[in-house]
Image (tube, helix red, strand yellow):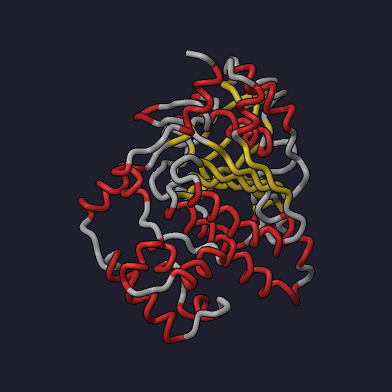
Amino acid sequence: MEAEDQVVAGDAVISDDEEESLFQDIDLLQNHGINVADIKKLKQSGICTIKGVQMTTRKKLCTIKGISEAKMEKIKEAANKLCDPGFLTALEYADKRKQVFRITTGSQELDKLLGGGMESMAITEAFGEFRTGKTQLSHTLCVTSQLPGANGYTGGKVVFIDTENTFRPDRLRAIADRFNLDQNAVLDNVLYARAYTSEHQYELMDFVAAKFYEESGVFKLLIVDSIMALFRVDFSGRGELADRQQKLAQMLSRLQKIAEEYNVAVFVTNQMTADPGATMSFQADPKKPIGGNILAHASTTRISLRKGRGETRIAKIYDSPDLPESEATFAITGGGINDAKE
C-alpha cells in the first residue's frame, strides 16, 4: 500500500448510515418551522448539530445576535423533538460507546497503560515538568492518528492548537519517516492554529466545531498544547483567580462537548507548579498540576509524566474512570514516542 494512500485514508467518504449515527445536522430544524436565517446565526456561533443545541444553555442562545427569547424556546422545542433528551438504558449506552476508538501513542507500553491508546469522546490530559515529553507526545499523536489502527479505525486529520509556540512541522517529518509515510501528506492533514490569549483560545473552539461539522468524520484528534499557559498569563494573583477558573471551566466544557458531539479524541497538556503546602505533609514530590479542581474534574483521564534515566520517561495514571493506577516507561526518540529499550 502506498504511504500516501495510507495517510489520506482519513478522507474516505463515510456512508450516509454511519454519518447519521455520528450527529444530526442542525439544518433538520427547517422541517420544524425554524427559518434558514436563524439556523445560519446558530452555525456562526459554532452550534452546528442538534446535540449542539441541547448542549447550549437558554441564556447562551439568547446572547446570539438576532435570537429572541421566543425564537430560542422554539429552537429548543424543535431540537428536543428531533433528539430525545431523556434516559438510555446502560445496554443502549454501551452500544453507543462502540463508536469510541483509540489512537496509538507510538509506544506499546504507553498504549497498554491507557487501555489501547488515546480514547475518543474524552479529554486525556498529560502533565509534567518541562522536558518530560508532553510536546513530543503531542507531535507523535499528530502522525499516529493518521495511521489505520485496531477495530476498524481508519485514521484521520488532526487539529493542533499551540499556546506556547512549541509546534515544529519538521519534527512531524522525522516521525512520518519512522512510519514510512509521505511527509507532505502527513503535514497536510494537520490543521494548526497559534493562540495568543485565553480569549483567542476559546474563540478558536467555534472554528474547530465548524471545521468538524464541515468535514464530518474526517477529523479524529484535537490537541491543545498547553491548556493552561495563556490562563496563567492573562489572569494574575488571587484577585483574578475566581474569574480565571470560571473561564477555564467554560473552555473545558466546550472541549468535552466537542469530543462527544463529533466523536474525536481530545489531548491536552498541562504545566506543574510547586505546592508550598506539600512540605508540611512530607510528600515525596511537592509539585502538582495547575488548573485546580476544575481541570482535575474536567479531564477524563490524567497522566502524570516524569523524567527517567537518559531519554526514558515514566507515565503514571493519575486519575481515570476505568483504568487502574499503574506506570509505563517509554522513550523519546528521533521518530517520536517509542518503547524504551531494556
Work out whether residue 76 or residue 223 is closer to the camera in this orientation and state it. Answer: 76
| Quadrant where the image shows the C terminus | top right
Location of residue 6 with respect to 260 vertically, above or below:
above
Q: Position of residue 216 (x, y in %)?
A: 45, 46
Residue occupying image coordinates x 39% and y 75%: 75
Work out whether residue 318 or residue 71 is closer to the camera in this orientation and state it. Answer: 71
In the rendered image, which quarter is residue 308 located in?
A: top right
Q: Position of residue 6 (x, y in %)?
A: 50, 22
Residue occupying image coordinates x 70% and y 24%: 311
Location of residue 201 with respect to 305 vertically, above or below:
below
Is residue 282 visible from the viewing direction of this image? no
Residue occupying image coordinates x 54% and y 80%: 66
Is residue 61 visible from the viewing direction of this image? yes
Location of residue 204 with respect to 108 vertically, above or below:
below
How many discs mark residues in the rendered view?
A: 0
In the rendered image, which quarter is residue 306 located in?
A: top right
In this view, the residue farthest toward the front is: 36
Q: Position of residue 199 (x, y in %)?
A: 70, 64
Residue occupying image coordinates x 50% and y 26%: 147
Classify residue 132 as left or right of residue 97: right
Location of residue 142 with respect to 292 vertically, above or below:
above
Classify residue 8 as left or right of residue 237: left
